[in-house]
Image (cartoon, rainbow, N blue to C red):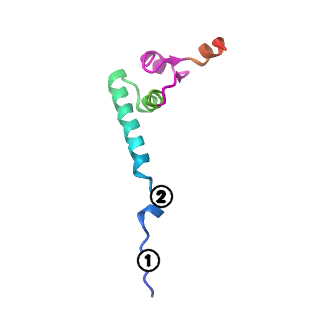
Amino acid sequence: MTAKAPVEEAQVGSTPESELAIWEKLAQQALDITAIYRLRGSDAIYAAAARRFACPLVTLDQEQHDLVAAAPQAYYPVELLTEL
């Protein structure tokens, strides 16, 4: 029986450190938003992504819309459609 060559971590589903740093920062922002606005975790992730990419949050979720209305700016889809 021959020994198999060790598989390097970089070859098996690894993520570059810079990408991990981005995800860690987004996760921390989501935690902060959860604590400040009392949003559920999944809603906080969407809000954190909107804040991170400096774009408005578009949602049908009334709680998410009302709690995060100021940071980032939150809209219902119909609000944006009327502006077109």
Identify the residue shown where x is 47% and y is 31%. 49
Q: Quadrant of residue 38?
A: top left
- Look at the image and say whether residue 56 sits in the magenta stretch: yes
Q: Residues within 10 Å of mark 1 (few under 14, many from 20)?
A: few
> Mark 1: which amino acid?
Ala
Among the 4 quarters of the image, the one containing residue 83: top right
Residue 13 image label = 2
Is residue 54 rendered magenta in the image?
yes
Q: How many marks?
A: 2
Residue at coordinates 41% horizontally, 41% vertically from top-left?
A: 22
Badge 2 amino acid: Gly
Which residue was labeled with disc 1?
A: 5
Q: Where does the magenta region start and end?
A: 53-75
Residue sitting nearer the eye, 12 or 10: 10
Compared across the picture, whether 76 is left or right of 48 comes to: right
Q: In terms of image quadrants, where is residue 45?
A: top left
Q: Position of residue 4 (x, y in %)?
A: 44, 79
Determine the residue positioned at 42% across, 67% down. Answer: 8
Residue occupying the far bottom of the picture: 1
